Image: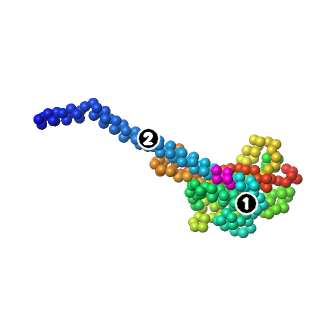
Amino acid sequence: MKTHIIHTLKRFLNSPRRQERGQSMVEMALAFPILLLIMAGTLEVGKYFNDYITILDATREGARYSADGEITDRSMTPLQADCNADKNFFHLAACLTHDNIKKNLAFNEATDDVVVSAMSIDTNGHIITRFPRACGDPPPPAQLIGTYLFGGCDTHVTSSQQGWSLCQQVPPSTGTCVVKTSGFSNTAIEAMLAQTPNSPATGLVIVEVYREHHQFLGLIPPGMPFLPQQVTMHAYSMMPVPAAAPPPSYTP
């Protein structure tokens, strides 16, 4: 009886079906990490683009609001964290953008920033002057001087191509933040304007957001360039601003 049982057990362990089942388990164990990596990567990419669309929509809201704004509105007192504390053109655009992001995403005051730039453009597609203007930069043409905006400068900025930074102008109440600058130089903007020649003189506002995006699941190992642990998102929107356009009497 004992011999029969041992013989039956050996036959079961050595059966082809048993061997195939063991082979399948080994293959599954080898393939599972790769499948998990593919699934995690798909989710990470989807989350990245969802977050990017959110901040892109926020820049559009800020730019649309600025399009109807009065660019000569500049606060003469220290700015407050409250968007409604003053009528500063740049602050309101940045604040509206910031608040729209925070409705759906976390906004890290220490690393993220909103940058707003405005400019006057002549009929040749050249930037006459850019705001906020640095006090060390050349003054705007005399034909434009006559308002606080065109004649004044901002002591916070070192270059007119820097832009108005929310982090710099309204720093967080606790800790420090990383000041970002505009990603668009005057040369880059004029190159884009050159694609539509013979355009009328106009004003332009650019609202940009820089946001540090971290992995959603954190399952992707470090060192993979196509799915980094952390990446800086940069979204922007441009919109015409009639209030920043040069007067009809201006000639290039």
Q: Main secondary structure of the magenta part?
A: helix
- Residue range highlighted in magenta: 57-62
Q: Secondary structure at mark 2?
A: helix
The chosen color scheme is: rainbow
Q: Which is more toward the observer, 210 or 46?
A: 46
Left or right: 252 in relation to 115: right
Quarter of the figure with residue 157:
bottom right
Residue extending farthest to the right is 249
Residue at image x 80%, y 60%?
150
Task: Examine the rendered structure and indicate whether residue 31 appears above or below residue 89.
Answer: above
Q: Residue at x 44, y 43 (%)?
A: 36
The image quadrant that residue 68 belongs to is bottom right
Q: Position of residue 127 (x, y in %)?
A: 78, 51
Residue 27 in percent (x, y) is at 36, 37
Q: Residue at x 69, y 61 (%)?
A: 91
Image coordinates for residue 94, horizontal then vertical, percent: 67, 58
Q: Residue 125, which numbered label? A: none
CA distance separating discs 2 and 1: 50 Å
Q: Residues within 10 Å of mark 2 (few under 14, many from 20)?
A: few
Q: Nearer the viewer, residue 149 or 73?
A: 73
Residue at image location 57% in from the left, 55% down from the top = 105
Identify the mark nearer the N-term, 2 or 1: 2
Q: Position of residue 95 (x, y in %)?
A: 66, 60
* Left or right: 53, with 143 as reference point: left
| Figure disc tally | 2
Q: Specify the farthest residue to the top.
A: 16
Tell me the tag on residue 89.
1
Q: Residue at label 2?
A: 35
* SS assignment at label 1: helix
Callouts 2 and 1 close, C-beta under 8 Å:
no
- Tell me the kind of residue under disc 1: Phe
